[in-house]
Each structure stands twice: as structure tokens, then as C-alpha cells.
Amino acid sequence: MKILIADDHRLVIEAVKTKLSELQEGIEFVLAMNADELRAAAGSDIDLALIDLSIPGAEGYSHIDELRSRHPALPVIVLSGYEDPAVMRAALERGALGFIPKAYSPDVMLSAVRLVMAGGVYVPPMLLSALPGGAVPGPAGAPAGLAVGGTASAARGGAPTLEHLRKVLTERQVEVLQLLSQGKPNKLIGRSLGISEGTVKIHLAAIFRALNVRNRTEAVVAAQSLTEA
């Protein structure tokens, strides 16, 4: 698994690396301390990105918008010193799958990352309490989900097309989808592709979002219908 961390404070980076190392063995970390380094470091081989809002060279949410535009299948979590619900909402509306205030504990951060890896969205409790009915903001133009205890389930919309999938899925994610369609479990998918189960879960989360489905069974059905179209 390869995780990108973008923050201009070395102590923060080292602390995040230490805690995220508990996810699994052999994690490779890619670091960026400003917007230019983030732009250079982001690539199709990155499995997860934790991005600070205030890195040098970034204007507002420009670096988040650019990252989402260039790598729409990459799960992005914002790690920030801001605790303003309006800022949190704006980040989630831009496609971030989580917003973790730096004041939160390392254990909360780890749990939030695990949630995102499993296909969920981490929403800080302070944002949930500020929203009517617990409605979670989603990417611009997309329907919002309903939050439950800091998670969100994506509302289902129209069926995606093959053209859409080619734009949002990486080659590796397409390979994962093909093996998933063959009924292979995560362990065998990982073994076949030479990646860990944790990385498989991250790819599956991206696949589920792209197909607009909630689980493996729905993903297989959706993939088969695309093949037949």
C-alpha cells in the first residue's frame, strides 16, 4: 500500500506515518510539503492521500480540486487544523472522503482512515451536529448521503457507463474488478495482483463509488451488465 501525506510540518508527518503504520506491514509513504510537491507526488500508484488544507502554494481548496480532477478514483482525506463546520462541508463537497481535525486523537485518525478504506466517509461529529437531519454534503452535483455515527452511505443514482468507468478507474482497479467478477475473495485478488488485502479494499471502495453500488454482489451485477451492454 502506498499512502501520500501532504503537510508542511515534519512533526505532523512523522506522527501520521507512525500511526498509519498500524494499518498493515510494508506501507510505503510518499511525502509532500507544498503544493508543487503534492502535484509531483500524486500518481496512479497512490492508494490513499491525506492532505492538509494549508500547505504552502495552495490557495483555498485549489490543491484538493486539482487532485480530485487529476485522480478522481484516489481516496482523499483532509487532515486540517481547522474545526469550522463550513470548511469541513466544503472539503467533503469537493469529493474528500473524510475530514479529520488535527486536534483529534491518533486513534480517531486511524479509525477514520480504516472507515474510508472500507468504502465509507468519515464525517466529524461536530459537522454532523451542525447539519439538519445529519445530512452529509457530497461532491458538487451529487446527491447527499445520510450520516450515521460519522459514516455516510452514498445515495444511489443512475447507472454508470463504460466510458465513465474508463475515466475514473485506474488499470489496477479494472483488474481488481475483473477478478471480483470471477468471484475471487480479497485474499486471492491480492495474491493474483501482488498487492495486500488492505490495498484491495481501497480499490474496491473506489470501484463501488464508480459503479454507484454498496457491496460486492451489486458490483458484480453492475459489471456484468456493463459487459453485456
Image: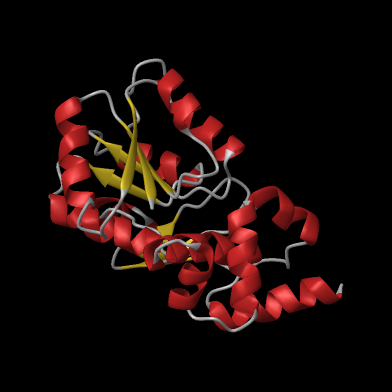
Res 16 → quadrant: top left
Image label count? 0
Q: Residue furthest right?
A: 229
Q: As drawn, is 215 to the left or to the right of 87?
A: right
Which residue is drawn at the image coordinates 41% and 64% (left, top)? 120
Colour setup of the view: secondary structure
What is the x, y in percent for residue 102?
A: 19, 40
Vertical order, 122 against 87 (above or below): below
Vertical order, 49 against 218 (above or below): above
What is the x, y in percent for residue 70?
A: 60, 36
- Residue 134 in view (yes/no): no
Which residue is drawn at the image coordinates 35% and 16% (left, top)? 56
Res 25 → quadrant: bottom left
Nearest the eye: 33 or 30: 30
Q: As drawn, is 181 to the left or to the right of 138?
A: right
What is the x, y in percent for residue 82?
A: 25, 34
Q: As drawn, is 116 to the left or to the right of 143?
A: left
Vertical order, 10 against 74 (above or below): above
Which residue is drawn at the image coordinates 49% and 25% (left, top)? 40
Q: As drawn, is 189 to the left or to the right of 177?
A: left
What is the x, y in percent for residue 89?
A: 40, 44
Which residue is drawn at the image coordinates 54% and 48% (left, top)? 139
- Residue 229 in view (yes/no): yes
